[in-house]
Amino acid sequence: MNESELLEQLKAPNWHVRQAAAQHQNATERVLRKAMGDVWSVRAAAAGNPNATANMLMVVLNDDHPDVRVAVVNNPNATEWVFKQAAIDEDERVRKAVAHNTRASTIVKSVGALGR
């Protein structure tokens, strides 16, 4: 599936179709940016996509929905900056995601495990 086909899927009335487009391995930055303006489940799919850039993840880390922020933490492109910010998140699920992430530093993991 190419970019234009994925962009078309993001127009579908069914959020499952839009979520699948956001998760797709061929999703480009353009597709992911558009998906990040959708409902939380589609935003979470885009935030978890390995094609999401570190800059995109830094922006979406401010999302209102904790599942989107957890997806950011679990993204392979999440940076130490993302882990540091997420370690002090108001939601315990986000902090636990940091504490269990093997790529986060030991110090950041301990902050996430301790909570706010």
Image (spheres, rainbow, N blue to C red):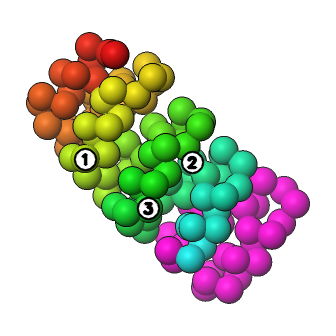
Q: Residue at x 76, y 77 (%)?
A: 8
Q: In the rendered image, which residue does mark 1 sit on?
A: 81
Residue at the farthest right position: 13
Closer to us: 11 or 88: 88
Work out whether mark 2 precedes mark 1 in sequence or the reverse, and give the earlier one.
2
Label 2: few (<14), some (14–19) or many (≥20) C-alpha neighbours in 10 Å: many
| Residue type for callout 3 | Met
| Horizontal side, residue 69 vs residue 100: left or right | right
**21 versus 42 height, above or below:** below
* Callout 1–callout 3 Cβ contact below 8 Å: no
| Residue type for callout 2 | Ala
| Residue type for callout 1 | Trp
Q: In the rendered image, which residue does mark 2 sit on?
A: 44
Circle 3 sits in a helix, a strand or a loop, which is it?
helix
Is residue 95 one of those drawn in magenta? no
Is residue 26 visible in the rendered image? The answer is no
Badge nearest the viewer, 2 or 1: 1
Place of residue 20 in the rendered image (x, y in percent of width and height, measured from the top left):
66, 60
Q: In the rendered image, which residue does mark 3 sit on?
A: 56
Task: Provide the residue span drawn in magenta.
Answer: 1-29
**18 versus 27 height, above or below:** above
Work out whether mark 1 precedes mark 3 in sequence or the reverse, and give the earlier one.
3
Q: Specify the quadrant that holds the N terminus.
A: bottom right
Q: Residue at x 27, y 18 (%)?
A: 113
User: How much space separates mark 1 and mark 3, taking CA atoms?
Assistant: 13 Å
Place of residue 57 in the rendered image (x, y in percent of width and height, measured from the top left):
41, 55
